[in-house]
Amino acid sequence: MKLYLYHTPEETPSDSLPDCAVVIDVLRATTTIATALNAGAEAVQAFSDIDTLMAKSAAWVAEKRLRAGERGGKTVEGFDLGNSPLNCTSEVVTDKRLFLTTTNGTRALQRVEKAPVVITAAQINRQAAVNYLLAKKPETVWIVGSGWQGTYSIEDTACGGAIVDSIVQQDNISLSEITGNDEVVGAFSLYKQWENNLLVMFEHSSHGKRLLGLNCQDDLKYCAETDIMDILPIQKEPGVL
Ligand code: 3SL
């Protein structure tokens, strides 16, 4: 198994695909996806644009769908939910399909949707992603951070490092053995620096500050929790987890 880490979807090679892509958007899309599925959502269908989401969701039974998403962190007008994982309680999402659009996370998913296996990870379900990788040992794995409109987001890279850290803590796997590009070593070191203070790191990050400005302190706290659920969102068809 060789891991390659890309800070943003734009950095991923456009002429190849990995055996498995791990998409990360800790703040907040992949945290929301894990939370919704863990709470009993039937599926999450991700869209990078609102018009396509509206058209596809219109064909779904109204009682079985929720339109969710944000632009600039704020709920899209007329949608049932924003992009806060805290709103994805079992009372709200059980047996419903979430039609989700976000600024960066859903775009990252779209970038690698043709890979044979696509999973999503966040800090809250990091170990579920690691367990999958250790069980399947795909030859090439791309860990793809969502970033922010083409720029690096520290919390996504740190989560990639958390995945690397957990893998190398297993017997017989060394960092050098699984490292496909230097970004993997960088992400590992970043995570080791902040692993006991993730919330503080989020508060320093540009996206964390943006969310704090929208009064999303509780979201930040929740997104910084590690390994609190054993759910692995895995793509069933392009865009559907
Ligand atoms: O960019 C995204 O995909 C979002 O997760 C951003 S936000 O945290 O909802 O603002």
Image (cartoon, grey):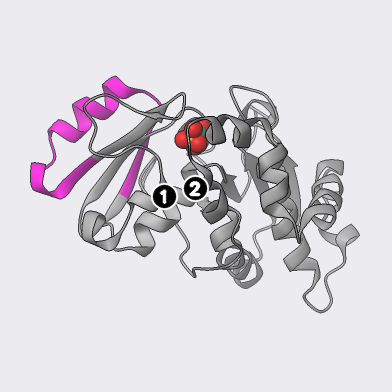
**Pointers 1 and 2 in contact (CB under 8 A)?**
yes
Q: Quadrant of the N terminus?
A: bottom right
When the figure is inspected, residue 10 is found, relative to residue 140, above or below; the finding is above
Q: Of helix, strand and loop, which one carries label 2?
A: helix
Classed neighbour count for the residue bearing mark 1: other residues with Cα under 10 Å, few (<14), some (14–19), many (≥20): many
Q: Can residue 61 be seen at all in this image of the molecule?
A: no
| Residue at disc 2, CB closer than 8 Å to ligand 1 | yes
Mark 1 vs mark 2: which is more N-terminal?
1
Q: Residue at the spot x=68%, y=24% of the render?
A: 151
Q: Quadrant of residue 100?
A: top left
Q: Of helix, strand and loop, which one carries label 1?
A: helix
Residue lying furthest bottom in this view?
171
Q: Residue at the spot x=66%, y=65% of the render?
A: 137
Inspect the magenta stretch and tell me whether residue 122 lies in it. Answer: no
Q: Residue at the spot x=73%, y=67% of the render?
A: 166
Amino acid at circle 2:
Asp
Query: Can you give x and y, in whole percent of width and height, for residue 85 in the image?
Result: 41, 50
Query: Can you give x and y, in whole percent of width and height, for residue 194 in the image?
Result: 79, 53
Q: Quadrant of residue 77?
A: top left
Query: Can you give x and y, in whole percent of width and height, for residue 47 in the image?
Result: 37, 32
- The disc placed on residue 219 is 2
Q: Can residue 150 be seen at all in this image of the molecule?
A: yes
Extent of the magenta region:
44-66
Spatial CA span between label 1 and label 2: 7 Å
Inspect the magenta stretch and tell me whether residue 50 lies in it. Answer: yes
Q: Which residue is mark 1?
A: 85
Q: Mark 1 or 2, which is nearer the eye? A: 2
Query: Can you give x and y, in whole percent of width and height, for residue 240 in the image?
Result: 35, 46
